[in-house]
Amino acid sequence: MDSEAPQTRHLPSVPPRPRRVAFAGTPDDAVPTLRALAEAGFEIPVVVTGAPRRRSRRGSDAPSPVGAAAADLGLTVSHDPADLAGRGADCAVVVAFGQLIAAELLAATPMLNLHFSLLPRWRGAAPVERAVLAGDSRTGVSLMALEPTLDTGPVFWQHEVPIGPADTAEGLRELLASEGATRLAASLAEGLPAPRPQSGTPTYARKLLPEDRRIDWSQRAAVIDRQIRVGGAWTTLEGQRFVVRTGRPADSPPGAASDAPPESAAAHDAAPGTLAGDVVATGRGVIVLEVVQPAGRGAIDAHAWLHGARLPDGARFG
């Protein structure tokens, strides 16, 4: 990005061994870091998180996962980012906060950010999901100095994690959150290394929209599999929304040795989106359905759903 370097010159440096550490974060992914800092004995003067909100249709307002964890730890909770700079902290740690930190706050208190990617690849809101969708072979977690510009700060360290063919975005986020939390707490206790500017070509991980999760059955099975592993992949059946919770590709052609069900041979010759038992035809290869969620229902095993659905021959997803 333009003007990255000038914006970093006037920001305060993080002390090598801070002891009084403010914290900002909101979702489940941020909770392991908060707990790791508390367990390591750091003084946490304030935890800034999103305000309580309703998390189900019939429920009352509830605290964010970080807010609930902070209360459990007996820590002071705030919903005002300005408190990150107003509690005498040596620095602040930010993990999946969900809000941009104002430049004047960054100028007042040095801040670290734990980001779930190998920066500068996948700067932005959905780095793990974008890595899976892109078919990346690896992801990771980076500890960087926070800057006013989006995920541009110098990096103290990175930890790489391979992305396996069955890894989901949810599972990878849990792993990165856990390993990142442990490494962050240890590096603050042992002393931070000197940060290095990011190197490489940046890519940007914009937030996923509903259309990013909509399945195009004319795509290859491998592409659709990645959508399913990101979570929330959906299509339509008989004009209604239909979510594929879990499934797997079976790309072997008819007659080849594979673990594909017998229906896959028929699906290979069918139009994309056509159902043959629990197998769906794609532009190349097939997807075997495992757990699905029809409109108005909870998640259900694909075999059980098919047994009760009584679909006509040649039924096809939209």
Image: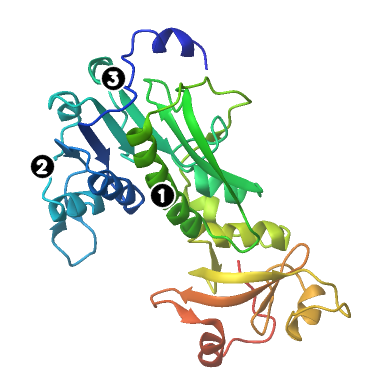
Closer to viewer: mark 1 or mark 3: 1
Labels 1 and 3: the sequence-earlier one = 3
Q: Amino acid at mark 2?
A: Thr
Q: 130 or 147, which lies in front?
A: 147
216 w.r.t. 159: above or below: below
Q: Residue at x 48, y 46 (%)?
A: 208
Labels 1 and 2: the sequence-earlier one = 2
**Label 1 to label 2, Cα distance in Å?**
22 Å
Q: Position of residue 160 (x, y in %)?
A: 57, 43
Q: Amino acid at mark 3?
A: Leu
Secondary element at image label 1 = helix
Give the residue number, with chain letter if any, for mark 1. 177
Q: Position of residue 87 (x, y in %)?
A: 12, 27
Labels 2 and 3: the sequence-earlier one = 2
Which of the labelled discs sits on residue 106, or is there none? Answer: 3
Contact check, label 1 and label 2, Cβ < 8 Å = no
> Quick one: quadrant of the C terminus?
bottom right
Q: Position of residue 301 (x, y in %)?
A: 51, 83
In the image, farthest residue toward the front: 190
